[in-house]
Image (cartoon, rainbow, N blue to C red):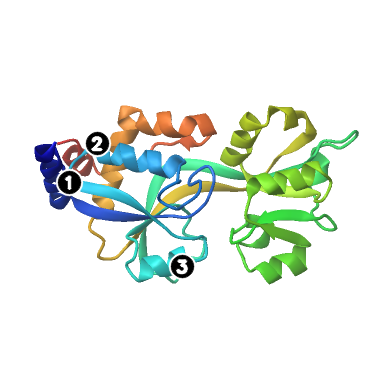
Amino acid sequence: MGALCLLLAGFLCAAEVVKVGGAHFPPYVIKSNLQESSGLLPQLLEALNNAQSEYHFTMLPTAIVRRFGDLQRGRIDMAIFENPQWGWQDIDAEAIDMGLEDAELFVARNEELRDQAYFEQLAGKRLALYRGYHYGFAQFNSDPEFLSSTFNANLGHSHDSNLLMVIRGRADVALVTRSNLYDFLERNRDYARQLLISERIDQVYRHHAMLRRGAPISSERFAALLEQLRVSGELQRIFSPYRIAVMPVLADNSAIESAQD
């Protein structure tokens, strides 16, 4: 046992540690504290670690509003499942296309005579939104006061709670990521007939990783590792159950080959 521990310690010392921010963002990160965290990010980091031994990816807890400062200060090296439009414009970070697509959908209570036309106009409706999120209909302005005053929005910290507000008539429309919505319906099948899901999409998430300058890993190397997982089917295994589309990404062939060595 002692020899095994020494071997493991030697491996971790040899590997470059890449610190990835984990903010509560179901189903990507569920409970960002290290003892209880779960979700898609821990699964992805495990797959990245299993695929190679040069880097060790580890998750550090952060928060939706704090992740920018944590990356700028070097507390984390990378934020994953991001969009460059979500407040990153003035931050010195490199965007890496992950080839993963999710979407933000409008959801209302299913009532007699209510159809897709209900989602055409948001004015006068009570919205249930997630605090800190950037919405397309609001020109990606996440300021809570702006959203509350302009769109009659209630801002919470739980997609599940926002959906329950709609079901119970306390809100008219909730905006929810497609991945979270279908995870919610899988866990609460009795609610499926009570919800009207929009064909209208607020925005499509083309997920990116935001990498700080000076991080232990280069953008090319990280992109190559993702491509390795894409080719092996690992990304499909992790993300397809949540209706997150795994898309092709153009990558440098030499970088991909080096990741597979």
In percent of the image, x 59 and y 58: which residue is there?
133
Foreground pick, 149 / 39: 39
- Disc nearer the start of the sequence (1/3): 1
Q: Residues within 10 Å of mark 2 (few under 14, many from 20)?
A: some
Query: Disc 2 on helix, strand or loop?
Result: helix
Residue at disc 1, secondary structure: loop
Residue lying at the far right of the rendered structure: 113
Corner quadrant of residue 230: top left
Q: What residue type is labelled 2?
A: Ala
Q: Compared to 251, does 143 lie above or below? A: below
Q: Name the residue under label 2.
A: 51
Classify the position of the C terminus by image quarter.
Answer: top left
Position of 214 relative to 9 (above/below): below
Horizontal arrangement in the rendering, residue 79 relative to residue 205 (left or right): left
Badge count: 3
Q: Quickly name the residue at label 1.
A: 54
In the rendered image, residue 253, in percent from the top left (x then y), is placed at: 22, 40
Identified by mark 1, the residue type is Glu
Secondary structure under the numbered disc 3 in the rendered image = loop
The quadrant holding residue 49 is top left
Which residue does the numbered mark 3 point to in the structure image?
Answer: 89
Distance of label 2 from label 1 (alpha carbons) = 10 Å
Report the side of 118 relative to 26 (left or right): right
Q: Type of residue at label 3? A: Gln
